Amino acid sequence: MGQIIEFTDSGLYCPAGQFYIDPWKPVDKAVITHAHSDHARPGNGSYLCHYASTPILQLRLGDNAYQSIGWNEPIQFNGIKLSLHPAGHIIGSSQVRIEQDGEVWVVSGDYKVENDSISGAFEPVPCHTFITESTFGLPIYNWKPQADIYTDIRNWIHSNQLAGKTSVLIAYSLGKAQRVLQAIAHLTGKVFVHGAIWNTHQVLLQAGWQLPEVIRVTPELPKEAFKGQVVIAPPSADGTPWMRRFAPYSVGVCSGWMQVRGHQRRRNADAGFALSDHADWKGLLQAVKATGATKVYATHGFQAVFSRYLTEQGIEAAEVKTEYGTEEEEAITEPEKTDE
Amino acid sequence: MSNTTDHTIHMPGLGGMQQFAQLVQDLGMHTKTNDKLEALVHYFTHANDKDKVWVIALFSGRRPRRTINSTQLQTWCAEVVGLPLWLLEESYHTVGDLSETIALLIPEQNNPAVNGQPLHYYVEQFLQLEKADEATKKDFILHSWQELTSKERFVFNKLLSSTFRVGVSQSMMVNALARILQLESSVIAHRISGNWDPSTTSFDALVSGEGGSVDHSKPYPFYLAYAIEEEVAALGDPADWQAEWKWDGIRGQIIKRNGQLFVWSRGEDLITEKFPEFAALLDKLPEGVVIDGEILPVKDEQVLNFNVLQTRIGRKNVTKKHLQEAPAGLYAYDLLELDGQDIRHLSLTERRAALEILIQGLQLPFVQLSPIVTFDDWQQLTTLRESARDLNSEGLMLKRKSSAYLVGRKRGDWWKWKIDPLTIDAVMVYAQKGTGRRSNLYTDYTFAVKDGDKLVTFTKAYSGLTDKEFAQVDNFVKRNSIEKFGPVRTVKPELVFEIAFEGIAASNRHKSGVALRFPRMSRWRTDKKADEINTLDDLKKMLALYGK
Ligand SMILES: [Zn+2]
Ligand SMILES: [Zn+2]
């Protein structure tokens, strides 16, 4: 019997169901794990995703043929059974489970095992074959518990306030920004956000999410308004003239890559917080083991290292080349239209 | 980035090692001098005295000797974390630094000690470990790894492997101390120079200059020049300036005090033993003298290519053969102490006059005055400068005749005016990831020139491109790798760069037969194709012209 999922030039393909998962070339039928731009690309004939992803896809890709389902609500067609399961990565992020003639494959999409209380708790899904991401598939990537990282961020904000500086936190506009916002909202009266984050924020509010209040940074706001305050901005805004209005300020980058000093320095950040929406080394291993899979494919990042390690641990594993980004979701940050 | 002088996270009440780890992190993160200075001031204000002494020692190159090699560290780390060695190596290639890799791999304790041992405790343990057997060393290290936090583990490993490099100049540290102690930085600089033992010197004794016995070997901090940034004519009246050739050797101080001779390098290493030929100075020099000069390979009163001397510097013992083939001489620039008196405050003209009398009185052929280049106007000097390379000189030094001998790198009175570098166009053939802040980018390249239809590698270069250009080249490397040898990638020979360098010498260690001095990428020649690069013959012609 052939594979339930094949690895093609356009992406992961399910021949029986005639659909692709997170294709990077336009296809007829696409199943989308989550709304980050390296996984959800424009130009597909139809999109199937979790209903929490739909409004964001709508914002990013415009009108399309969207079909939404919930987690653990299987649909059957062409002799296969397809269902989505929480991946814990960002709002709406899902693993895709496909069952055909009793054999089960799961495509993880991006995931993290720590519950961030926004994205839904990662669910280990038993399967025969597991296609896992491995963005941080090296043992140097061991995340601190998020509560500790939030404490670090809050301490940093306090010391900036003492020094009379604005704290500019760099976070991806979908996922990280909402997490950071939850963690710091009570610290200051107001949190300012960049337009790209504002746009996402509005969509999520409309979709019924409860999020702390934010103020959009606009050209009309006087410079003094930001003094000692917190601003959340996407990576694309870092180092641009848009930042000048916050002076004096300090920049803190929130990303798993900040685990390594060299990376932190290359970003020219004043502070780095290794806060990630991806699983760390232990998280990846834990997830793989929990599926009970006898065959694992690793994509997305350190796939060669991770699959070699799994093989040595007695789990049959291979690497698969995909075109998902290794820079954590950099591409989500569309340019600000109204500012600058 | 941020716009004020104050800076990052300083939590109150941090214990010794934690404070030091925080300092190292701050110094690594800040790009602005002022921010680094603030971090140092903060540290020296809050740290305990014994730790401060060690930080002064570490940051002025007085590192504890390495007692454990990196293979041992790697093996023990792999053992502790239960990972295969290859995975440790993969991790190392991504991080670019073994100390940091280990710091990240060892799992974090759930309840790290709030106030752990201070810095001096660890450094002093290292000193004791020098003589210990391997099992004792291992036991101490594994134990320390467990009790330290990741940040602390990083500096611990750095100290252990003696690979400490912080982005801080000695003068910056001196300035921080000067600010706290409200003393002139020149006073501090002098007090912390020379021979002193951090394990027996107290902070007060060190900075008050009352540190027990008198240290006769103590050199003065060197006065260093910046490269001139504008037209020389802007310096004003040529009559106010003294021009000398800029020599490319080892800047050093020759000290005679208390009937002893000391030779110091600019890196504050005592190198007296390396130059037995200078022993003759002990009898000839009067008591209480400090000369600033350049140690150069000199034969028959001709300065040779610095490469000649370099071959013997690295050796433990200087042999007779070395003394014959690469004889060292001294070109004297300045006189800092005479009759035991510090004369740095006198004008250059006065100091030079005293220096000339002193040197002429010596009658030693290997000690020469660095000749003054006489000139009437700037135009004439510009022409003279062109001949520098023929003399194995790097260009000119311009010194204001009225200038005092200052401390550290200062603008205004002394300038270096180097000749333009030599350049050659070459194609990139190998790439390797950088270290430290470039650990995730391919930034270390090997270049080749043409030899018929073959390519011959001749140099590596790591610097000279902007961050943006590095990112572009990195992208090219990732898409155009032909082969992978460990961390090295063979890339399609397509990208052409202009390589600038300061000198060229024959070398049988290199396939091309030449070795370059200070090679760097001066320009990305996007206008050139790989078949338009220079040839091995071009390099050989340069060697014939400038390689003597
Ligand atoms: Zn994602
Ligand atoms: Zn992704």
Image: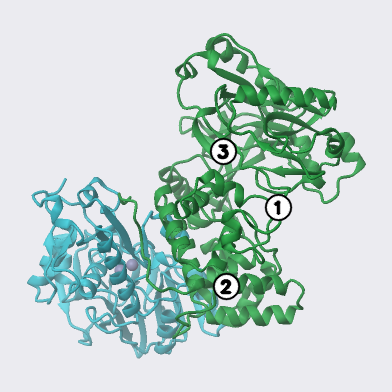
Chain colours: A cyan, B green
Q: Subunit of mark 3?
A: B
Q: Nearer the viewer, mark 3 or mark 2?
A: 3
Q: Subunit of mark 2?
A: B
Q: Quadrant of the N terminus of chain A?
A: bottom left
Is residue A315 visible in the rendered structure shown here?
yes
Front residue (pair B427, A246):
A246
Place of residue A312 in the rendered image (x, y in percent of width and height, measured from the top left):
57, 81
Q: Are marks 2 and 1 on the same chain?
A: yes
Of the image marks 2 and 1, the number of the one nearer the N terminus: 2
Q: Quadrant of residue B294?
A: top right
Place of residue B211 in the rendered image (x, y in percent of width and height, measured from the top left):
64, 58
Q: Helix, strand or loop at disc 2?
A: helix
Q: Which mark is residue B87?
A: 2
Tell me which image quadrant ligand 2 sits in. Answer: bottom left
Using residue B286 as the reference point, say whether residue B207 is left or right of it. left
Q: Nearer the viewer, mark 3 or mark 1?
A: 1
> What's the residue at 43%, 65% (across, down)?
A321
Q: Are marks 3 and 2 in contact (CB under 8 Å)?
A: no
Q: Amino acid at mark 2?
A: Leu
Q: Are marks 3 and 1 in contact (CB under 8 Å)?
A: no
> What's the residue at 36%, 86% (across, down)?
A104
Q: Amino acid at mark 3?
A: Arg
Q: Circle 1 sits on which residue?
A: B214
Q: Quadrant of the C terminus of chain A?
A: top left
Of the image marks 3 and 2, the number of the one nearer the N terminus: 2
Q: Subunit of mark 1?
A: B
Place of residue B142 in the rendered image (x, y in percent of width and height, measured from the top left):
62, 81
Disc 3/disc 1 C-alpha distance (Å): 44 Å
Q: Is mark 1 within 8 Å of ligand 2?
A: no
Using residue B96 as the reference point, say whether residue B211 is left or right of it. right
Q: Circle 3 sits on which residue?
A: B520
